[in-house]
Amino acid sequence: MKKYFPVVLLVLGFLIVGYSPAQATGQAAWNIKWNSNGSLDETVTIRNHNIIIQDNEWQTSRSDQGLILTRHINNWQEYSKLGDGLPLELSQKDFWLIKSSTLTMKKQARPGSLYEQLTDFGGARLSIEVPGIIRESTAQEKIDSTAVWTLGTADAVTLNAVVFDGIVLGIAFFALCAIIILIIFLSRIRRVNRLIAQEYSLERAAEEFARGDMEEQENQ
């Protein structure tokens, strides 16, 4: 019996690795990158699953990783109108350079949607990267500005973040640089005018004239 013990351990090891949660979560990955200009880059990677894609909104390709779906969306308002996407709702409060943003997953998804299919499979990995700071989330994992969930196991998908408005921030930075350059330019102009005034003032001219008379008298 002892001679079969290493073989039994080896088989058990393969079974544990093969059916571990990490392996399950590797079957599908749904990634959303929220850009500073408000646009979204969405990528879904699916392995070893037969998926029915109902809409032609996706650009599809295949690689060693499996089926890859990608698309670019201008903003969250446009995203909410798409037929085959995550059932997310966005609410925002504007504070000039920043926005307090909250993403919430709806309880009901469109029947037969890609999200519903991946949720039924279980173990699909969802990650959302925000252009700012994550304040609160129900994510199982948070890496810098990226929150990660496992679809089908999370009770709710909620994300609250402070998002920087890239357009307004760019305009403010440009205006600040212009003001700094203008201040430096005016300061140098003022310095030049002061030097010119000192060099060609009446007192300086009188001193030069007096010095010239004294030198002339000494030469005589």
Image (tube, grey):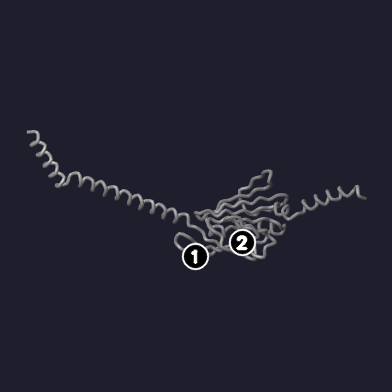
Image quadrant where residue 116 sits = bottom right
* Residue 113 placement (x, y as % from top left): 66, 58
Name which residue type carries label 1: Lys
Q: Is residue 166 above or below residue 137?
A: above
- On the rendered image, what quadrant is the C terminus found in? top left
Q: Residues within 10 Å of mark 1 (few under 14, many from 20)?
A: few
Image quadrant where residue 109 sits = bottom right
Q: Residue furthest top?
A: 219
Name which residue type carries label 2: Pro
* Secondary-structure class at tag 2: loop
User: What is the distance, in whole Å, between disc 2 and disc 1 at their CAs?
Assistant: 21 Å
State the count of labels.
Answer: 2
Label 2 sits on residue = 87
Residue drawn where x is 53% and y is 55% of the image? 131
* Residue 141 placement (x, y as % from top left): 64, 58
Horizontally, residue 169 falls left or right of residue 9, namely left
The residue nearer to you, when weighing 11 against 55, is 11
The residue nearer to you, when weighing 179 against 48, is 179
Mark seen at residue 103: none
Image quadrant where residue 158 sits = bottom right
Residue drawn where x is 62% and y is 53% of the image? 31
Label 1 sits on residue = 93
- Mark 2 vs mark 1: give the one in front: 1
